[in-house]
Image (cartoon, grey):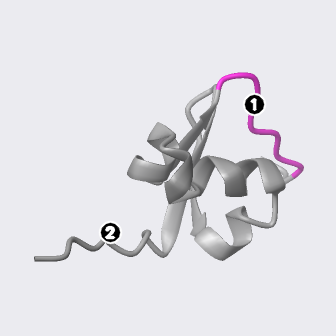
Amino acid sequence: MAFTTPDPPEYVTLVSNDGFEFVIPRSAACVSGTIRRMLDPASKFSEAITGRCVFEDMKFVSNAPL
């Protein structure tokens, strides 16, 4: 019996250190080489398994008026 790896999820979650979560298409996230490598199933990083990238050093900044 051959085992196949499941297809990676179509969407991933990016999390800033202040708790904001952004669910975006994997294709958009993978424009960044760093994120692409984090999400590569061959990397065995936890992000590749969970589809969730937590950025400890990045805060969400919005230019939208409140």
> Looking at the image, is mark 1 or mark 2 nearer the viewer?
2
Local SS, label 2: loop
Of the residues under marks 1 and 2, which one precedes in the sequence?
2
- Number of marks drawn: 2
Residue 56 left/right relative to 61? left
The answer to whether marks 1 and 2 mark residues whose Cβ atoms lie closer than 8 Å is no
Magenta stretch prevailing secondary structure = loop
Question: Identity of the amino acid at label 1?
Answer: Lys
Q: Is residue 27 magenta?
A: no
The image position of residue 20, as x and y in percent, is 59, 40
State the residue at coordinates (51%, 40%): 45
The image position of residue 34, as x and y in percent, is 78, 47
The image position of residue 51, as x and y in percent, is 47, 54
Q: Is residue 16 above or below residue 31?
A: above
Quick one: label 2, few (<14), some, or many (20+) residues within 10 Å? few
Residue 55 falls in image quadrant: top right
State the residue at coordinates (63%, 47%): 38
Per the model, the C-alpha gap separating discs 1 and 2 is: 34 Å
Q: Nearer the viewer, residue 41 or 58?
A: 41
Residue 50 left/right relative to 63? left
Question: Identity of the amino acid at label 2?
Answer: Thr
Kindly identify which numbered label has been placed on residue 5: 2
Magenta residue span: 56-63
Q: Is residue 26 above or below residue 48?
A: below
Local SS, label 1: loop
Q: Is residue 56 above or below residue 39?
A: above
Residue 55 left/right relative to 6? right
Furthest residue to the front? 1
Residue at which label 1 appears: 59
